[in-house]
Image (spheres, grey):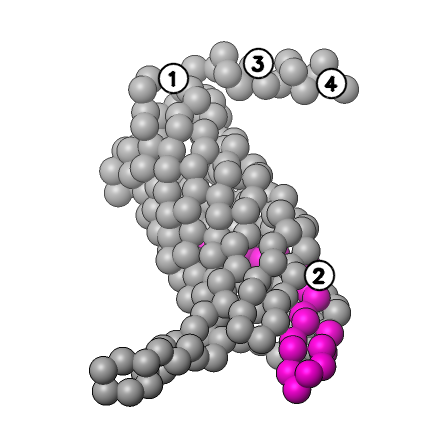
Amino acid sequence: MKKYSLLLFAFLLSAGMMAQDRGSVILNAYGSYVFSDKVDFDYGHIKVGDGFMYGAGFEFFPQKSSSIELKYLRFDTSMEANVFQYNSNKRVDGNGAFNFILIGGNHYFDTGNNAVPYLGGGLGMAITEGPNGGSDTNFAWELKGGVKIKTHSKVTVSLQASVISTWAAAGTDTYWGYYGPIAVQDYAVSYQFGLGTIIGFDLK
């Protein structure tokens, strides 16, 4: 099986490159492994487990080397919340999920090879499902980079590293200014670091 995988990889690298044309629309299927994270806030913390993130989206090329991307990603994971209040520690364990809706884009550094590096990012929202039910919608952003492998077919394979960050309001911090106390919004920030693969299908 290992020999067949090496042969397939060698074929993808040796195949002639099919350039992404202006006006192309790509249907992308996403899959990645996401590492665990610990989110701290004023009165406790939440441990977010590792897991598998998956989703789908569309990528439109207004120019040959730049794209606009709209996608949906879902990350099912375990959550452990520890909240400190009134000299006690309240702990809640269970399963939750992050649902990301992001719009952004990529820039491809096409040098004539069939392995094309790229960088990209996006902005959007994260709908977080907690262990006890209910959901909360917050701001999210993404940074990513990788390599897209192109072939003569309409199918492409991308290897990508990414980070998606969610910002949730978590109380206020008080600072003393010239005119007295000033309340400033505090945020709990999570970071989902992922390594994965994208399978693209050219719809043009």
User: Alpha-carbon neighbours of circle 3 within 10 Å: few (<14), some, or many (≥20)?
Assistant: few
Quarter of the image where one finds residue 106:
top left
Quarter of the image where one finds residue 147:
top left
Label ID, residue 10: 3
> Which part of the image, by quadrant, shows the C terminus?
top left
* Residue occupying image coordinates x 52% and y 54%: 191
Sooner in the amino-acid sequence: mark 2 or mark 4: 4
User: Alpha-carbon neighbours of circle 2 within 10 Å: few (<14), some, or many (≥20)?
Assistant: some
User: Alpha-carbon neighbours of circle 4 within 10 Å: few (<14), some, or many (≥20)?
Assistant: few
Which of the two discs, 3 and 2, sits closer to the camera? 2
Is the stretch drawn in magenta largely helix, strand or loop? strand
State the residue position of label 2.
Answer: 78
Where is residue 50 drawn, in percent x and y? 67, 51
Q: SS at mark 1?
A: loop
Sooner in the amino-acid sequence: mark 1 or mark 2: 2
State the residue position of label 4.
Answer: 2
Looking at the rendering, the stretch of residues picked out in magenta corresponds to 71-91
Tell whether label 1 touches label 4 (CB within 8 Å). Answer: no
Tell whether label 2 touches label 3 (CB within 8 Å). Answer: no
Image position of 94 with respect to 163: above or below = below
Q: SS at mark 3?
A: helix
* Residue occupying image coordinates x 73% and y 18%: 2
Label ID, residue 199: none
* Circle 3: residue type: Ala
